[in-house]
Image: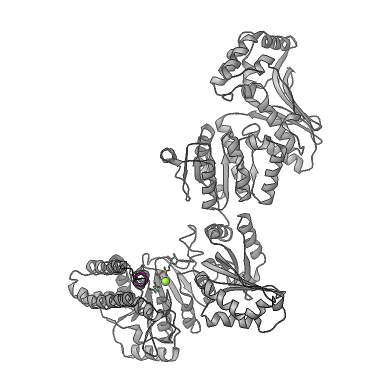
Amino acid sequence: MKVLKFGGTSVGSAQNIKKVIDILQKESLSNPLVCVVSAVGGITDKLLEAGALAKQKDKKYKTVFDKIKTIHYKVIEELTPDSTTIKKEVDTKFEDLEQLLNGIFLINELSPKTSDKLVSFGELLSSFIIAKTMENMGLNTIIKNSQELIVTNSNFTKAEVIYDVTNKNIIDYFNQATQQVTILPGFVSKSHLGEITTLGRGGSDFTAAIIAAALKVEQLEIWTDVSGMYTTNPKLVKQAYPINNLSYQEAMELSHFGAKVLYPPTVQPVLNLAIPIHIKNTLHPEANGTVISNQNNGSDLTVKGISHIDKVALFTLEGSGMVGIPGFSKRLFETLASEKINIIFITQASSEHSICFGIDEGNAETAELAINNTFENEISLHKINPIIVEKGLSIIALIGDNMKSHQGISGKLFSTLGKNNINVRAIAQGASEKNISAVINNNDVSKALNSLHERFFEVNTKQLNVFITGIGNVGEKLIDQIHQQHNFLKKNLKLDVKIVGMANSRKMIFNPKGIDLNNWASQFHHADKSSIEGFYQKVIELNLRNSIFVDVTADKDVAAVYENYLKQSVAVVACNKIACSDKYANYKNLQDLSLKYNASFLYETNVGAGLPIINTLNNLVASGDKVISIQAVLSGSLNFVFNNFSDKKNFHDTVKQAQFEGYTEPDPRIDLSGIDVARKILILARENGIPMEIEDIVNDSFLTKSNLESTSVDNFYDTLIEEEPHFQKLYADAKANNCQLKYVAEYKNGKAKVGLQQIPEGHPFYNLEGKDNIVMFYTQRYPEQPLIVKGAGAGADVTASGLFADIIRIANK
Ligand code: ADP
Ligand code: ASP
Ligand code: MG
């Protein structure tokens, strides 16, 4: 004989009930079956909702009642061609239900006892409909009301089973039953006084386990809407997967800590008899599911699952009056027991100075009152403080029988939470070491589960959640590159890079699952209005693990929010130079925040676009080398200008062409004045550990006074024409010396300067072409032959690839 239980979704529609009947038909060929069913999915909640409305004298309870009726009618009509007889019988049940609701409405009261009567309709209806349908199909089926078998105490809404009477009832009944399939409602029971009771929310699993144990069957099957007990809640973590085997203890811990797929008390009755529990999926009967048993499951996984409980209140009782006083905890826990409050979590400091425990948030007020009452005397004598209550918390727990024989699990747990900026409010580890739990904020749960799942179960893949601001030339290229490399990175580097947010100054879009990069542009076209603050708020609200903010703008207001991102442990990648070339104090502050909050701040593209200049310098410094000097050509724009300008082509036209071809900033004065180059050498000096300001950099401008004093871009161009002789002279002087003109940045002995120089033939700068950049590092290890980095130092493609490299560098940290 076998016991099978089908949950709310499994009996939630005619289509699914047909699947249930299929399964029963197949399995009953070889075995007599006991089949326990839940209420039609969502009905228990609706019954409670109707009850609550009626109690509040809100007539809307009638609408909810009608809805309950319609749902059942629909199921019946779709199940049976001739539904009138079933409907007729069901109608008498609905009349009773309606009367009960009317009564609640009239007396304005809903006691736990009445509530149990009310919710029992759900299972009574579903079991009746299924049994009748099977009977009509000519199957050898009978319905038995479990209220006639399962006897409990009068603890309404979560009654305790009186096993001796219950077991006898079950054995006696099934001894004489001859049908191949017996259908019973789950969840419902009766007290020894004959009152209707229930076994607690989710209790149909328990009904099935009670019957399985009484009959000592070979197997208990729990059929539900997922393919077993998963490594963590599959609704919250997409990558979760079913666990093949679990021990009873592991299953109990997981369900106790919130894995709703199994009602926690279910394990108890079958545990001593070693009856295996098989969790199966009604919608995919072919899937293996999870077997819970005593068998050594052969799995070498230390952590088997991660679960969580929402809406926990944390209570802390503190005070010197607690130390060394026996019976203190006893009084505390007795107080809670007398209020029937279940404790989920306890931890006590070894000094006994404080005790901390977690309970369901819904019981917080009652518990607070009761405890302050119990300890009224001690509180008034200031021996202990009034109890502290914190709400809005959740518990997450790592579960596994083998955790006790492995070091470093809690280390991994807390470092993963820490890295993701998840604050841990309290910690507990069971003495059996089958479970380590931590209390965190409700709004960190999804991030915690996802990052812990990644850490313990997907050792191989890491998801990066990227938020890009600045969807211009470079931004678009970056999106294309991420799109194009997605599969490569996933396969070869085990990185899953998702772009979750995109914004420019006008619009922004988000998709926590990752924006579809096949048609991002059209989605962006229809996007919401954006703001820098709004974008930031959304990133924080989404609270995703491994979040990276990428700044592809040149906007000072965007640079001003890096600080906020870093403080929330969101990494920052920027090609925007403003933050790093601003006041030294600001640069330093960002570096410090990056260290403090363990959030990377990378800006390789600030100097030489995609060329590995900053990274090379960082590696030299980190490995103990000392920089003697840096000489560099760092402006693609100026390089273009001086490579094209000659006695045959005037300066004005050359600059115009450079601007036309996109080599200069919209205001070419930023490039020509040398400011941009000065910012770059400033950043290199700072990376070398020198606390320098932009004013400390000697800028020996090659522009004339009138160029520099120009009042607008147009006016600047006019002055270039006027000053043509000046530029021709620069050219002629260089030519006479057989030199090329290059705009050079130099750093030496803590000092830096930028300016135009005549470069003789044979010098590495002499043949520098197009928009190329070059940097020469003279160091103690490279004293004569410098370490040279050279290549294209501007352009959307290379800048995007530099940003991309920074993103990947963060992943590898
Ligand atoms: P039923 O109505 O069949 O009893 P439940 O809704 O009570 O189903 O339980 C199944 C649900 O449990 C799943 O749909 C899933 O959302 C939730 N769940 C939470 N944690 C887990 C887990 N670790 N494994 C599987 N399901 C889980
Ligand atoms: N119908 C009840 C509930 O929703 C019992 C169950 O489904 O297990 O809690
Ligand atoms: Mg359930």
Image height check: is 166 above or below 502?
A: below
The answer to whether 633 appears left or right of 440 in the picture is: right
Task: Determine if residue 130 is in view.
Answer: yes
The answer to whether 652 appears left or right of 63 in the picture is: right
Q: Is 616 in front, or is 569?
A: 569
Q: Is residue 52 on the magenta stretch?
A: yes
Q: Give how far across and how far down residue 383 sits, in percent.
A: 70, 77
Task: Determine if residue 36 is in view.
Answer: no
Q: How is the image coloured?
A: one colour
Q: Is residue 290 on the magenta stretch?
A: no
The answer to whether 784 appears left or right of 75 in the picture is: right
Q: Give how far across and how far down residue 711 sits, in percent.
A: 61, 19
Which image quarter: residue 35? Answer: bottom left
Of the four image quadrants, the one with ligand 1 is bottom left
Image height check: is 189 above or below 730?
A: below
Which image quarter: residue 720? Answer: top right
Q: Is 309 in front, or is 66?
A: 66
Image height check: is 60 above or below 495?
A: below
Q: Give how far across and how far down residue 786 sits, in percent.
A: 76, 30
Q: Quadrant of the N terminus?
A: bottom left
Q: What residue appears at the point 31 percent right and 66 percent down from the top-left corner? A: 60
Instruction: Give the main secondary structure of the magenta stretch.
Output: helix
Q: Is 656 in front, or is 114?
A: 114
Q: What residue appears at the point 57 percent right and 41 percent down from the top-left corner? A: 550
Q: Is 502 in front, or is 813?
A: 502
Question: Which residues are the magenta region?
Answer: 48-53
Q: Give how far across and how far down residue 494 sits, in percent.
A: 56, 50
Q: Hey, which residue is sitting farthest front in the picture?
A: 380
